[in-house]
Image (cartoon, rainbow, N blue to C red):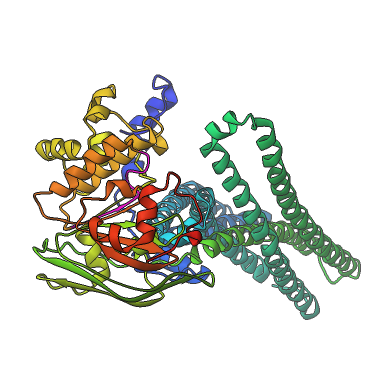
Amino acid sequence: MSNTPQEKTGVLYRIWHSTFRHLSRLDYFQLQQMSIHYRDLRIFQYICYAVRCAAPLSTLFLFFSSALSVSLSIYLSFIMGDITESVSIQAYDEIKMLGVVMLLVWISIPAVQMISFLSNMFVSQNLRGAIIDHLSARITFAEKRALEKNHLGNLVERIEVASVSLPGVVSALSDTLIKLFSVLILVSVLLTDVSVELAISVALWITSAIILSAYLAYSGMKFVENASDTHSKLMSEMTEVIMNIPVISAFLSNQYERKRLNKYLSQDIEACRQVRTYWLLVQSIETAYKWLFGFLFIFYSFYQFESGVFTLAQLVTLLTLIIILSWHFESVAFHFVDFFDSLGELNASLKDIRRIPISVTEIEPIDKPESFSISLKNIFFVEDGKIILNDVNLDIQSGSKVAIVGFSGSGKSTLLKIISGQMKPTHGDVLISSDVHFDDSWNAIKSISSFSDQNAPLFNRTVKENITYSSHTANDEKIKQVISESESFSIIERLSDGLNTVIEEQGTSVSTGEKQRISIARALYKESSVLFFDEATSSVDIKTEARIIRNLLKDPQQRTLLFVTHRVASVKEFDQIVVVSHGKIISCGTHDELMTSCHLYVSMQTEKSFDNDEKDLKVG
């Protein structure tokens, strides 16, 4: 559905709809996706790659049309001069010819400017779309632990700023180069028919002014990057506040959060003002430099006129060109500021995204194996100097139902993430044995497995779309089956539009337990050989959880199941129960075997609270 103004009866709208609307559908400058395998986010390399992929032709048109427009405008001034000279000698035939040329140039300038405007539009929109597509796609390949350390609002803000600032850099660069080009033309005219001393002086003035403007603008990039970082923090805080409105309301912390947010807002405003006041200093220095030298040249020109060196016509021409040139210098200075302002914002945005490690590997679909076993050999996992898993060895047979239990912080969830390929161990090997050959065992696990955890993240889409997410196609019989296995019928019946009910952002239209059951249905819908459940039923009532586990254990497809839970009473029927404590597997076996050999497991069966310090328990 296209986005058009609601008011469709106005004259301007009808004119646009029948004419210029078609320009928005042109295929001449189609958006080309940037390869996800391109990982170099260094600023200039990234700009060049983005332009080469998304807007090569429109960027060339932008530079060419802008240069042509400036050239025609300057040429128009020359024609005026020639007409004035022809009038003075009464060369009427030449005046007529120059008049025709002037009209042709006058008509051409708007057409060229229109091409320049359209080129700039396609450059901006194509680059903006390409950057959003590339960086957001890149984030989807980010390592999970890295994403957990970044605020959601910060990442969204960084991508948005990058998508705006990169086209801004290209546009500002185009404007700056075109202005420099026009200055070069004017200088060549200005230095014609003047003394060598004046020519050298003007050349030095021009060169030094351009270098000074570029340096002053470049020096402000640090202020821009700091302001961008500060604004990103503000956006992160705003996102966090909006996501936690129920908590804020429950604790009557509305005014507290407002005051807290205002601290970040004050820092943001101060950082922005620092940027603008620095640019004010830059403009003041440039203006003083420009007008000081301009004053000297004007004074010198009058002196040369008084001395009889310059005629009146030469004096007027020289003064006019100096005034025009000073205006162009001022424009160049502003364009330098725009260029480095956008460049600073882009650099700050890419800097944060660049720090997030990614693993860009396309996972090719593979045949579902009939047999599939996993072996962990001497697995260690260290994070921030702390040993999370310590020399873990484990064998998981194809089709077996394995429960992993342990107290909070014991390392059971980390163990499951390493088995499922979400995290890589610091040391050790995860070995896969199967009747199907895998080139990459890590990605093979992701291809043939399903995952569901206690957070149960859902999309702001219909229940059906969430359940069928793995294939993006709906099989009604299969949907009924997984709804039954996940004990989700009561949820569907409660919802106003059943399977077509849209789950609101963050799943606020359903309870946490209901989200978990829909997440389980989604995991079951995928054609998987292995199911990984990490506290996937932690918010489901005990009776419903028991029915879900019973359905999983029946499993006519004979899928391998790894089930992490803190409710040890629900795992009695599993083929193998793994007890984890302080990052080590202290015992494995069936429920009956562990009841006679593992004191910790026995204690967990009888403990009313699982938050007790397990260090006080004797482990057998």
Query: Is 408 in front, or is 297?
Result: 408
Quadrant the C terminus occupies: bottom left
Q: Residue at x 10, y 52 (%)?
A: 557
Q: Position of residue 609 (x, y in %)?
A: 45, 45
Q: Position of residue 213 (x, y in %)?
A: 72, 66
Q: Residue at x 86, y 64 (%)?
A: 292
Segment tinted magenta in the rendering: 530-539
Quadrant the N terminus occupies: top left
* Above-or-below relation of 225 to 304: above
Judge left or right: residue 82 versus residue 380: right
- Residue 303, by quadrant, is bottom right
Q: Residue 291: within the magenta?
A: no
Q: Residue at x 29, y 24 (%)?
A: 495
The answer to whether any part of residue 90 appears in the image is no
- Residue 296, by quadrant, is bottom right
Judge left or right: residue 450 versus residue 295: left
Q: Residue at x 59, y 58 (%)?
A: 345
Query: Is 131 in front, or is 213?
Result: 131
Judge left or right: residue 235 versus residue 565: right
